[in-house]
Every structure is written in structure tokens, then in C-alpha cells.
Image (cartoon, rainbow, N blue to C red):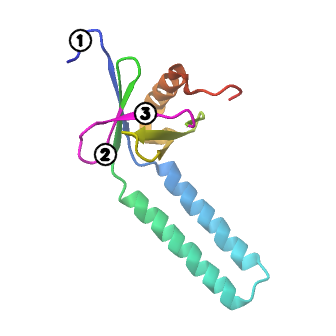
Amino acid sequence: MLKKFEKIEIYNINQSAVLIKWYVVIHIVAVLAVFLSALILRYQILLLIIILISLWDALNRQRNFNKVVIRHRFETTWDISYLDGIFTAIEILPSTVITPYVLILHFNVMNQKNQTILILKDALGHEKYRELLVLLKISGLQKDGL
């Protein structure tokens, strides 16, 4: 049961438009590299097909993206919720990467295999992203020298 002074922060992670644009740009560069290579035509076509399948897969995963909700409550408790809306306690690992534009969140769910979520700044909004970074840094996840 929550007490009056206990604050809960909720972070709704949405689909990132920047990530989709980066997928497209990286695949276009790969296509250009294939056409500029000295490979014979059939290998160029094979690589082009592989690159297009990769782009289709990446865009399909982003199209089917389900919102993820991360909740921080009390002093050190973190929870995560996927599509079902049921929160599960997680342990955020020190291997989490914190940068001003990208957050690679490493965590354990009930001592299972490590999981990772890529969070770009636009997936949360500027203020909520900044709040999340500050909370993670305060939690002791900031490594020296970063």
C-alpha cells in the first residue's frame, strides 16, 4: 500500500520515429555500397535481396511495436509492463548504457535471462527522457568516465 509521501514515476516508451529513419538510412547506405562494389552481378543481386529482407524485417518489428511502461517507485524499486498492463519487478543492471540521446536498458526479470530495451530520446519525450536518465544516474548506474 502506498503512503502519501511515496512518489511513483511512470515512463511510457513509445515507438521511435528516429529509429525508423535510421533503419532506412543505414539500409540505403548498404544498398549503395553493394552497387559500388566490384562484385559480379549475381552476388550484388543476392546482397540486395538480403538487405531488403533485413529492412522489411526491421520495419515490420517497428510497425508491430507494443508500448512498454517502466515504473519507478519508492527509493529503488523498478517495474516493467508490456502489452498486458501487468507490472513485473525488474532489477536494472550496471551494464545499462546511458547517453544523452540513447539509453540501452539492461535488466533482469525475476532472475531470468538478461533483457535489453533500446530507448531513444524521442520515444519518451525530452523531459521524461531526462527524468529517467537522472533517476538511473542517481540509482548508481552511471559508470565513471561517462
Tag 2: residue type?
Tyr
Q: Nearer the viewer, mark 1 or mark 3?
A: 3
Q: In which quarter of the image is residue 22?
A: bottom right
Residue 145 location (% of width, % of height)? 71, 27
Q: Which residue lies furthest to the right in this view?
A: 38
Q: Which of marks 2 and 3 is in front?
A: 3
* Mark positioned earlier in the residue sequence (1 or 3): 1
Q: Residue at x 42, y 61 (%)?
A: 61
Q: Residue 109 carries which label?
A: none
Q: Mark 2 points at which residue?
A: 82
Q: Residue at x 50, y 40 (%)?
A: 106
CA gap, disc 2 to disc 3? 16 Å
CA gap, disc 1 to disc 3? 23 Å
Q: Which residue is drawn at 23% across and 16% down?
A: 2
Q: Mark 3 points at which residue?
A: 91
Q: Count the numbered circles shown.
A: 3
Residue 115 location (% of width, % of height)? 45, 46
* Mark positioned earlier in the residue sequence (1 or 2): 1
Q: Is 92 placed left or right of 40 in the picture? A: left
Of the pair 75 and 41, the residue shown nearer to us: 75
Question: Which residues are drawn in magenta?
Answer: 79-95
Q: Residue furthest front?
A: 111
What kind of element bears circle 3?
strand
Q: Indicate whether residue 125 is drawn in magenta.
A: no
Q: Mark 1 points at which residue?
A: 3
Residue 35 location (% of width, % of height)? 71, 78
What kind of element bears circle 1?
loop
Q: Quick check: marks 1 and 2 in contact, CB under 8 Å?
A: no
Q: In which quarter of the image is residue 112?
A: top left
Of the pair 86 and 134, the residue shown nearer to us: 86
Q: Is 7 placed left or right of 41 in the picture? A: left
Question: Looking at the image, is 115 positioned above or below residue 58?
Answer: above
